[in-house]
Amino acid sequence: MSLEEIKKDPFIKSLLDEGGIEEPSGRFTHQIIDAIKAQSKANPFVYKPVISRNAWLVIAFLGVSLFFYLMFGASSEAQGLNLYGYSLNLDASKIQGFLSKIVFSFKLTPILKTSFLALAFFTFANLILFELRSRSFLK
Amino acid sequence: MKYQEDSFYINKVLKGNLPSFAILIEKHKGMAYTLALRIAKNHEDAEEIAQDAFLKAYNSLSSFKQESRFSTWLYKIIYNTAISRFRKKQLDQTSLEDMSIPDSLHEDDHDGLDIMHLRERKKIISTAITRLKEEEGVVLTLFYLSEKNIKEIEEITGFTDSNIKILLYRGRKKLLFELKKILKEEIVDIL
C-alpha cells in the first residue's frame, strides 16, 4: 500500500471531512486566557538587575582591596593614625597622592582617613550579612 | 475571520501581546480539540487536555524555533499531554487481525449514508471515529483532516514512517467496518 493509494481514497477523506472538526465550548478561549492571567499574577515578574550580584561582589572586593592596599601598603613614610586611643601605623600617602591627582590640593585629614576605614569596614560587614541573608532565604 | 500567518501572532505574543495568543487559540482550537477528543473519547477530558496544551504552548513559546509549522508543534504538545494523561488507561485489547473487516463498503451502504440527514450522518461518522483506537483516530485525523504529511505525523506522534502507514491502513478499514456496523444497528432500530 503506497501513500498515493491512501491519498486516493476520497471516500475516507469525505467521511472524515463530514465527521468534521469538533468545536469546544464557547468559553474555551476565555478560560485559557484567564488561566494565563492568573498564572502571571501567581508568578509576578522577577526583577533581574543588569549587573549581577556576583559582579557586584567582584567589584566590591576589588574596591576594598584597592583601598586597603592604598591604606596599608608598606611605605617608609608611614604616618600614625590615632583611632580612639589605639594607634595604627597607616600609610595614607598613596591615597593622598592618588586623590590629589583627581581633586586639586586634596588633603587627607586624620578624620577622613578614619571615615574611609569605617566605610571599608561597613562595606565588608554588609556584604557578609547580605550573603548570609540570601543563603538563608534560599533554604 | 481571515487570519494572518502564525508567525505574525507568535512574534506579537513574544513581545507580550496576550490578545494575539487568543487569536492563535481561535485559529487552532477546533483541530486541537478534535485531536484531544480522538484520544480522550469524551468532551470534558478533551477540553481539559486542549486547554492544558495551549497553556503549555504559551509558557514555552519562546522555545519554539519556528523551523516546523506552529500547528505541528502545537499538535505534538496536545498529543503528548493527552497520552501522558491516559497512559494508565488500558487500551482496547481486541486484535484487529481477529476481525473480519471488509476492504470497502458495499454500494448499498453508500446509499444508506446518502439518504440520511446531514446531522444524522455527522453523528454516525463521529461515533464510528470514536470507536477507533486512539492512535488510529489521531493518525487518520492528522492525515485526512489536518492534511499533515507522514513526516509531520512522525514529528507529532513519534511513530515511525511504517507504523503510520499501517495505522492509516488499519484505521481506514476499521472506520469502514464500524460505519457498516452502526448503519446495520440503525436499520434494525428503525425496523
Image (tube, rainbow, N blue to C red):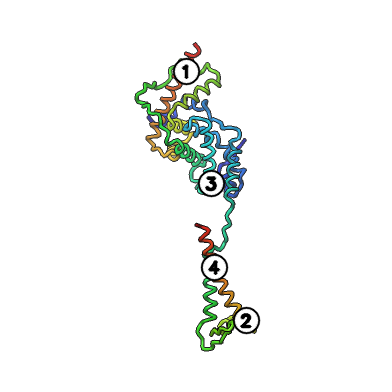
Circle 3: element type:
helix
Residue type at tag 1 = Leu
* CB-based contact (under 8 Å), mark 2 and mark 3: no
Residue to which mark 1 is pinned: B183
Front of the two marks 4 and 1: 4
Residue to which mark 3 is pinned: B59
Disc 3 with disc 1 on a shared chain: yes
Frontmost residue, B57 versus A117: A117
Residue type at tag 2 = Ile
Q: Quadrant of residue B3?
A: top right
Residue to which mark 4 is pinned: A127
Q: CA distance from mark 2 to mark 3?
A: 58 Å
**Residue at the spot x=59%, y=77% of the render?**
A116
User: If the image is split into quadrants, where does the N terminus of chain A sit?
Assistant: top left
Q: Chain of mark 4?
A: A
Circle 2: element type:
helix
Frontmost residue, A2 versus B88: B88
Residue type at tag 4 = Leu
- Residue B107 % position (x, y): 45, 16
Q: CA distance from mark 4 to mark 1?
A: 80 Å
Which of the numbered marks, if any, corresponds to residue A111? 2
Which of the numbered marks, if any, corresponds to residue B127? none
Disc 1 with disc 2 on a shared chain: no
- Residue A135 % position (x, y): 51, 61
